Amino acid sequence: MLRILSLKFGRVYRCGKFLFIIALFVILLMNTHNLLASFQRNELTDRRFIGLNKCPACFGTSWCRKFMNSQVTFEMWGRLRFLDFFNVKNVYFAQYGEPREGTRRVVLKRLGSNQELAEIDQKICKRATGRPRCDLIQGMYKTEFARLNGDVRLLTPEVVEGWSDLVHCPSQRLLDRVVRRYAETKDSGSFLLKNLKDTERMQLLMTLAFNPEPLVLQSFPSDEGWPFAKYLGACGRMVAVNYVGEELWSFYNAPWEKRVDLAKQLMDIAEQLTNNDFEFALYLLDVSFDNFAVGPRDGKVIVVDAENIIVADKRLIKRNKPENYDVWYESLYEECDKEACLSFSKDILCSRVTVDHNYYAICQNLLSRFATWRGTTGGLLHDPPADLVKDGRLTALLDECTRPQKQYGRFQAAKELQEYLTELTQLSNTNR
């Protein structure tokens, strides 16, 4: 019976695959004219295509000269507009060229789906006129983004608190850092909001409200050792970041030694974002195999989706001393019927000094046997060698990091797991 079912499934799969290829071929024939046109023109010089016509309701203009000079061009598949149907996240690969430096690969992001971008316009219009449709540029000047004009000296917490995850609980120290490191102005370096032009100020505030990922990358730059992709610039509603490498998911079935090294780096990231000399805790709220990438040369793991990150200022927490601020907070493991889900309270993340959220997120969604992604289970450290299975230490640490059985067990398990993965990595390097 099972044999018959498998044969039937195989035929259905092959038939479906064949029909998909035929459908794709028909689409190509129907779009032959558009296909040829796509290869002949560089749509990244089109103001409407990149959303430059919507500024100041956009993410910046620092890279516009590069776009308009055709220094940025789509790679082959990115030129085919009919494939945008499958590109829901609006993320593209492109080549960026400098006369003396040659070309290199970059990633272009619209920072949202087409529906999300349309909702941005509607929200701006509703804030300005109360209606979902309006003249977007004029509408921007009637929103709170424009009311913070040149007379306002500083960007303060009470103004932007709750606008997005980045500023769910902002401190003045964090906001000064965001303004001072804002890359979409020629006069960066000052924490004074009044030093920005009106359009620059509106672009910063809109980015902060709708998708703060560019501001996270600018405020915690890779050049200073933060585990994020390097921010390059923006033009309209197209943001350019450095290409890191293949997504972490591509290494799911890599050799054991490689997966151990990646797991160690992921735990290092969890530690760095939780405890650092700056006393900013950056909590990852969206942790999946798609949100990390691995460098092709150095093998370094980098966070490539930084939209959903809460930044808690530990210095402010210690100074204000909210209730239970010095009590260690343990994230609760909860059964979930979806992939890559996490349980957390944003308010608690913002009011405790010692929190295990990042360890919990990395262990549950990426490393342990409880991790599920694209129909798989077992996590990045699935199928360990027989001697490690027999020893049992790795499994025990991963389980305790995900579903702790002891009070504050995850804190200790995360520390030991980090050390153990370091030992395994060093051992594999010695045996090469």
Image (spheres, rainbow, N blue to C red):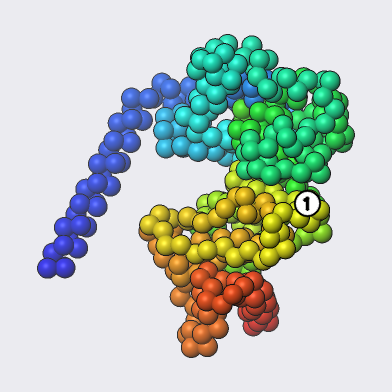
Q: In this view, does 74 lie above or below 3?
A: above
Residue 35 lies in what quarter of the image? top left
The residue shown at (64%, 22%) is 57
Q: What element carries label 1?
A: helix
| Residue 297 makes an appearance in the image | no
Residue type marked 1: Asn
Label 1: how many Cα within 10 Å (few below 14, some 14–19, many 20+):
few
Residue 361 lies in what quarter of the image? bottom right
The residue shown at (68%, 37%) is 161
- Residue extending farthest to the front is 323
The residue shown at (24%, 46%) is 16
Q: Where is residue 231 in the image (x, y as percent from the top left)?
A: 71, 41
For the N terminus, give its image quadrant.
Answer: bottom left
The residue shown at (74%, 37%) is 157
**Tag count in the figure?**
1
Q: Is residue 382 left or right of residue 47?
A: left
- Relative to the observer, which residue lies in front, 100 or 268? 268
- Relative to the observer, which residue lies in front, 156 or 247? 156
Q: In this view, does 201 lie above or below 422?
A: above
| Residue 144 makes an appearance in the image | yes
Q: Position of residue 188 (x, y in %)?
A: 84, 33
For the C terminus, give its image quadrant.
Answer: bottom right
- Relative to the observer, which residue lies in front, 377 or 229? 377
Q: Is residue 137 above or below residue 116?
A: above
Q: In this view, does 75 lie above or below 428?
A: above
- Relative to the observer, which residue lies in front, 149 or 396? 149
Residue 266 lies in what quarter of the image? bottom right
Q: Position of residue 349 (x, y in %)?
A: 64, 54
Q: In this view, does 380 lie to the left or right of 145?
A: left
Q: Where is residue 406 in the image (x, y as percent from the top left)?
A: 56, 77
Q: Mark 1 points at which residue?
A: 320
Q: Is residue 62 left or right of residue 35?
A: right
